[in-house]
Image (tube, grey):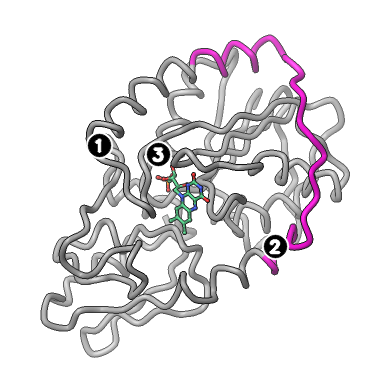
Amino acid sequence: MENVIYYFTGTGNSLMVARMLAQKLDGETELRPVVRELDKESIVVDAKQTVGFIFPVYGGQAPWPMMAAAEKMKIPKGVYLYAIGTCNERGGTCTDLFNCFLNKHGYALSYAKKLDMPGNCLPSNEQENAQRLELAKIWIDVMAKNINDRFVGTVEDFGSPDNNTEAVRAKYAQQPFGPWRVNGEACTSCGLCAKLCPMENIALREGVPQFADRCAYCFACFHFCPQKAIYKDYPHFGSADGRPRYHHPEVTWKDIAAQRKGR
Ligand SMILES: Cc1cc2nc3c(=O)[nH]c(=O)nc-3n(C[C@H](O)[C@H](O)[C@H](O)COP(=O)(O)O)c2cc1C
C-alpha cells in the first residue's frame, strides 16, 4: 500500500477529511481506524509513501487512542508523515504537541495542519458549520497537493508536561468532562449507543446504558442518541434536552461503529 491514513472520529468530521484526502493522494490509500490497533503489542506500518494521522482535537491535543496507537507504531524510514487535527477554531498547538509526542518515539512529522470543522463539544451554529464544511473542501485540495509534493512545513517542537497517553486519558476522565449521564425518562433502551461507541465502552444493563473505563470522549453517544437521552452535567456540553446534536451530514452511526474491532 502506498499511503495509509490512521484516523479516529466521534462525529464524522475526521473520517470525512480522511476519505476526501484519500481520493486526492497519489497512489492507493488505505484508511485504518486506530481503535482496531489498540490491542496490538506493536503496529507494523506497511505504507511505502505516506502515513497520515487524522483526528479530532480534544482540549488542544490528540485523542488518547490516537496517541496510544502512534506510540506502538514501527514506521519504515523515509516514509513521509503528516497530521491533521480537525477542530472548532481552538486547535491551539495540537499538531505541534502531537509532533513532539512522536519525536519522543523517534519520528517527526513533515507536515501538519489544524482544520476548522463544526464543533461537537462547544457548539458552533449551522451557518458556521456550513461555511467550515465548504472551506474544508478547499483546504483538503491544498493539503493533498502539499502531501503529494512532499512539502516539509515547520512543525514546532512544543513540549507539554502532560504530553503522554496516560496523562491525556486521565485529563478527560476528570470533571468537567465526565461522567456521562442517562435521562431515564427519555431513554428507550434502543441500544444504539452500545452499538455505535467506537471504543465499545457502553453496554446495556437491564436496559440502561452503562459506561466502562475506555471512553475516548468522542461524544458519539451524545450526538447520535435518537432520544437525546445521553448528556453531561457540565453546561457547555448541553443538558438532555436543549443543545443541538451534530454529526457530519455524510456520516452515519454505522460509519462510527465501523471503527470497532469486531467489524
Ligand atoms: C471532549 C472534546 C474536546 C474538544 N476540545 C476541542 C479543543 O480543545 N479545541 C477545538 O478547537 N475543538 C475541540 N473539540 C471539537 C472537535 O475537535 C471538533 O468538533 C472535531 O472536528 C470533531 O471531530 P470528529 O467529528 O471527527 O469527532 C472538542 C471536542 C470534544 C468532544
* Location of mark 2 (residue): 165
Question: Distance between the Cα atoms at labels 3 and 1?
Answer: 9 Å
Residue 93: x and y in percent read 66, 42
Quadrant of the frame with the N terminus: top right
In the image, residue 237 above or below residue 150: below
Asked if disc 3 is less than 8 Å from ligand 1, the answer is yes
Q: Earlier in the sequence, mark 3 or mark 2?
A: 3
Please provide percent x and percent y for residue 235: 32, 67
Give the residue displayed 56% in from the left and 33% down from the top: 114
Could you tell me if the residues under marks 1 and 2 are in contact, i.e. CB atoms within 8 Å?
no
Q: How many tags in the picture?
A: 3
Secondary structure under tag 1 reads loop
Q: Is residue 248 above or below residue 77?
A: below
Residue 80 image-quadrant placement: top right
**179 or 146: nearer the viewer:** 179
Q: Distance between the residues labelled 1 and 2?
A: 31 Å
- The span shown in magenta is 141-167
* Dot 2 amino acid type: Thr
Q: Name the residue under label 3.
A: 13
Q: Please check the rendered image and state whether residue 81 is part of the magenta-colored stretch, yes or no.
A: no
